[in-house]
Amino acid sequence: MLLKYYQKLDDAISYLAASFCNEKKLIKSVLGNKRITYIDIGTNQGTYLEFLSNFLKFKSVDCFEPQEELCNVVKLNNSNLNIKTHSIALSNTNQIKKFYNYRISSQSSLYKQNNTFKSLKHLEKISKVKTKKFDSIFNKLRKISFCKIDVQGEEINVLKGMSKNLAKQSISLIKIEISFISRYINTKPNFYEIINFMKKKNYYLTSISKIKFKNNKILLMDAFFEPKR
């Protein structure tokens, strides 16, 4: 009788736990315990790198963040790592673009905010940043363990700029922020476009995490992709 009770309790806990993704377990299941090559596109203040540092060992880390002062913070806070910081934005072209710097740095973007979140619209300055294609930097098609992309509306263009690396399936795991509601002017929800683009490159959606809602509708989420073997 007691055994049956514990079995039901275990089933209930397993069912509830299955309603969300444990990112740490997911990443470890893909990358194992080996030292990894990590690319962080849209590093901001480095909070995700800090999260990964709790359970991963790094061979090398490349961080891309257009806000130079944040690049300096990330480098200082992670001086124990083999880290390179790049004060540029990644896109599908090599050129100079406007960059909108907001008071809340994580909302800064190559695009100006619309009225989705008026409380986040405090624009501090507009600067000029250099954009480059991922493929023009990582052009030796070396193996990359993990790549995170969180670039406030520029995600699909970053992916287009890494087409050669995707075609060679040189990246083992990719995490992308996907939007269901546009938050920036001249951008659009990118869920279907990203899914279809990645499918053409033989990368498939394997998990999701950090789903956020606005008015009971999905606003955005993080999506994990792995290459089809």
Image: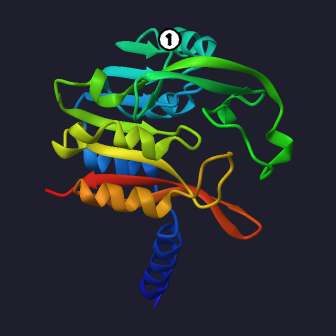
Q: Residue at x 21, y 24 (%)?
A: 139
Q: Residue at x 67, y 45 (%)?
A: 184
Q: Give the secondary structure at mark 1.
A: helix
Camera-side residue of 22 and 213: 213
Q: Is residue 1 left or right of residue 103?
A: left
Against 71, residue 52 (above or below) is below
Mark 1, residue position: 75
Label 1 sits on what residue type?
A: Lys
Camera-side residue of 78 and 42: 42
Against 72, residue 23 (above or below) is below
**Residue 66 location in percent, x, y?**
55, 21
Q: Residue at x 44, y 50 (%)?
A: 23
Farthest bottom residue?
Answer: 1
Residue 73, picture quadrant: top right
Camera-side residue of 223 and 136: 136
**Residue 181 location in percent, x, y?**
65, 59
Asked whether the viewer can see residue 159, the reply is yes
What is the total number of numbered labels drawn onto the structure image? 1
Tell me the quarter of the image containing the C terminus. bottom left
Asked whether the viewer can see residue 211, the reply is no
